[in-house]
């Protein structure tokens, strides 16, 4: 994202944070930003750029570190709500993809801004506890090309399975409609 567009996005988020009514049931005192979109859409790049441009220390959480396997999209979305956004002591648990099991917990400082990126972050429950929500769009062929170029043979056998989970989540939660901003990449 070009710097002027990134600055404008940060301004929109800051205005929302400063003027939004307090979010009940969340421990976070600064912005909570959800960046969602289908695989390969550019949400990780966007979230990383936002975190780097943020004017103060920020916590960036990637759902790729949380999904408990290829069928874990819904579980990770619930985990973000229950353990991170709605918790008095925010934390998340890493999934060890190599061992195929849950790994260590990471605590999150609720006094820092929080950016969560990943497919499944923008559910109705999670949006209710967020300050600003973003849905990232990209056409299907380009998404697939980018995702497979990034992850190669490790991802290719799971592309269709993961896409089915994405489509089910989208049909149920309608994250683009929940978004404060739909960003075409």
Image (cartoon, rainbow, N blue to C red):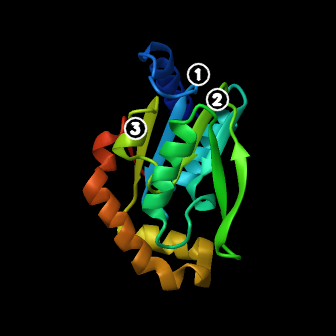
Mark 2: few/some/many CA within 10 Å (<14, 14-19, 20+): many
In the image, 78 versus 58, the foreground residue is 78
Residue 2 position by quadrant: top right
Contact (Cβ within 8 Å) of mark 2 with mark 1: yes
Q: CA distance from mark 3 to mark 1?
A: 16 Å
SS type, badge 2: loop
Residue behind mark 3:
127
Question: Measured along the vertical axis of the image, is residue 115 above or below residue 73?
Answer: above
Residue 131 shows in the view: yes
Q: How many marks?
A: 3
Q: Position of residue 86 (x, y in %)?
A: 50, 36
In the image, 80 versus 177, the foreground residue is 80
SS type, badge 1: loop
Mark carried by residue 110: 2
Name the residue rendered at 47%, 59% in the picture.
75
Mark 1: few/some/many CA within 10 Å (<14, 14-19, 20+): some
Question: Measured along the vertical axis of the image, is residue 75 above or below residue 153?
Answer: above
Mark 3: few/some/many CA within 10 Å (<14, 14-19, 20+): many
Name the residue rendered at 58%, 27% in the picture.
28
Q: Position of residue 42 (x, y in %)?
A: 51, 56
Mark carried by residue 29: 1
Specify whether 155 is left or right of 124. right
Contact (Cβ within 8 Å) of mark 3 with mark 2: no
Specify whether 22 is left or right of 174. right
Name the residue rendered at 49%, 41% in the picture.
34
């Amino acid at each position: 994202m070009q710097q002027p567009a990134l600055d404008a996005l940060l301004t929109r988020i800051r205005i929302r944070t400063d003027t939004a009514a307090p979010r009940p049931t969340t421990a976070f005192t600064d912005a909570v930003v959800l960046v969602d979109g289908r695989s390969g859409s550019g949400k990780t790049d966007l979230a990383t750029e936002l975190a780097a441009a943020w004017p103060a220390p920020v916590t960036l959480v990637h759902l790729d570190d949380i999904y408990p396997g290829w069928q874990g999209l819904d579980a990770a979305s619930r985990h973000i709500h229950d353990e991170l956004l709605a918790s008095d002591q925010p934390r998340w648990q890493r999934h060890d993809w190599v061992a195929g099991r849950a790994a260590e917990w990471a605590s999150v400082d609720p006094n820092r801004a929080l950016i969560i990126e990943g497919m499944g972050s923008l559910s109705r429950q999670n949006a209710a506890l967020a300050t600003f929500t973003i849905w990232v769009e990209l056409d299907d062929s380009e998404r697939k090309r980018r995702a497979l170029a990034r992850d190669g043979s490790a991802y290719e056998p799971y592309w269709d399975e993961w896409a089915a989970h994405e489509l089910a989540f989208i049909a149920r939660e309608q994250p683009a409609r929940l978004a404060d901003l739909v960003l075409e990449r």
